[in-house]
Image (cartoon, grey):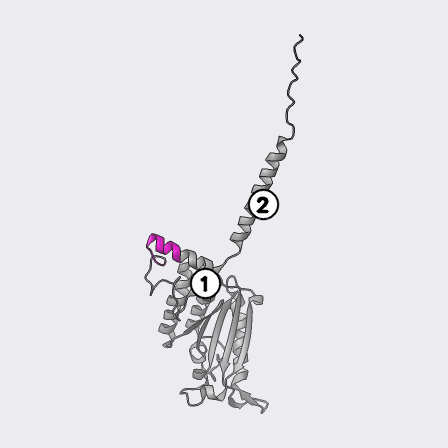
């Protein structure tokens, strides 16, 4: 009886298809993960932070609840939701903006500066009389020298957390006298000169371009300044708002 001839097994030349399919699947998973990481969900990040803090029994960034800038701000409320542009940046820079610079301003001018935190914007607001030389002086449209140095530090540090700068003067529109042509001169005219001066100054600072800066003048309602002490410059304010 003859022996059966045993045929040699042919090699599988299509194994690469399986490896290729596995590689495509892994690449797809990778891009899905990258996309998910690229979409920042502030509330989810906050929940993650709280879960980690609970699991490892620590709070904040090595600071107390009262001092931790990542947990609470001077105005109260939670900064991680209220101002995402701040929480994403260097903590020391934010602390310098919200603490040390206002303290320097108060030492120079004898007046406090108001800090407003709203959505993705931080605003520093002070009296016109503390920022500018008094009306009627030869340099009435110029910022005081000490305040200009403080403003330079404020703007240059804030450019690390913002890309837009708004300068708003809010003041009464009062008659200041007559011009050379006999026409009435109002405080709003001087405010516009001051705004133009600030608009020329800011782009000269580091990291600031002319396109980043916008200016605005708002007339105060009579109810906002009636009965308040001081001149219209004491009652009027100038605000620097930084946002993305």
Identity of the residue drawn at 42% across and 90% down: 227
User: In front here: 127 or 205?
Assistant: 127
Identity of the residue drawn at 34% across and 58% down: 59
Q: Look at the numbered disc 1 and give the secondary structure of its residue.
A: helix
Q: Position of residue 74 (x, y in %)?
A: 38, 69
Mark on residue 28? Answer: 2
Identity of the residue drawn at 35% across and 73% down: 107
Q: Look at the numbered disc 2 and give the secondary structure of its residue.
A: helix
Q: In which quadrant is the N terminus drawn?
A: top right
User: In front here: 217 or 85?
Assistant: 85
Q: Which residues are magenta?
A: 50-60
From the viewer's perspective, tell me whether residue 41 is left or right of residue 96: right
From the viewer's perspective, tell me whether residue 169 is left or right of residue 3: left
| Dominant secondary-structure state across the stretch colored magenta | helix
1 vs 2, front mark: 2
Identity of the residue drawn at 65% across and 28% down: 13
Q: Position of residue 96 (x, y in %)?
A: 39, 64
Q: Please give the residue where the numbered disc 1 appears in the rendered image.
A: 86
Q: How much space separates mark 1 and mark 2, taking CA atoms? A: 33 Å
Rendered image quadrant of residue 95: bottom left
Residue 51 magenta: yes
| Residue at far front of view | 1
């Amino acid at each position: 009886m003859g022996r059966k001839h045993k045929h040699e097994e042919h090699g599988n030349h299509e194994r690469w298809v399986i490896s290729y399919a596995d590689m495509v699947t892994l690449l797809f998973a990778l891009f899905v993960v990258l996309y998910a990481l690229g979409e920042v969900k502030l509330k989810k990040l906050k929940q993650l932070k709280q879960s980690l803090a609970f699991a490892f029994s620590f709070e904040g960034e090595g600071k107390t609840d009262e001092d931790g800038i990542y947990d609470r701000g001077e105005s109260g409320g939670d900064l991680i939701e209220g101002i995402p542009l701040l929480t994403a940046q260097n903590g020391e820079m934010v602390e310098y903006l919200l603490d040390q610079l206002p303290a320097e301003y108060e030492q120079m001018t004898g007046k406090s500066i108001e800090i407003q935190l709203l959505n993705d914007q931080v605003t520093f607001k002070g009296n016109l009389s503390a920022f500018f030389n008094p009306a009627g002086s030869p340099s009435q449209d110029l910022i005081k020298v000490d305040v200009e140095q403080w403003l330079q530090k404020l703007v240059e540090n804030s450019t690390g957390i913002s890309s837009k700068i708004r300068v708003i003067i809010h003041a009464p529109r009062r008659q200041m006298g007559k011009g050379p042509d006999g026409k009435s001169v109002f405080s709003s005219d001087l405010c516009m000169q001051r705004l133009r001066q600030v608009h020329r100054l800011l782009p000269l600072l580091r990291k600031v371009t002319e396109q980043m800066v916008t200016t605005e003048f708002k007339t105060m309602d009579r109810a906002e300044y009636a009965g308040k002490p001081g001149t219209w410059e004491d009652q009027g304010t100038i605000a620097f708002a930084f946002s993305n």
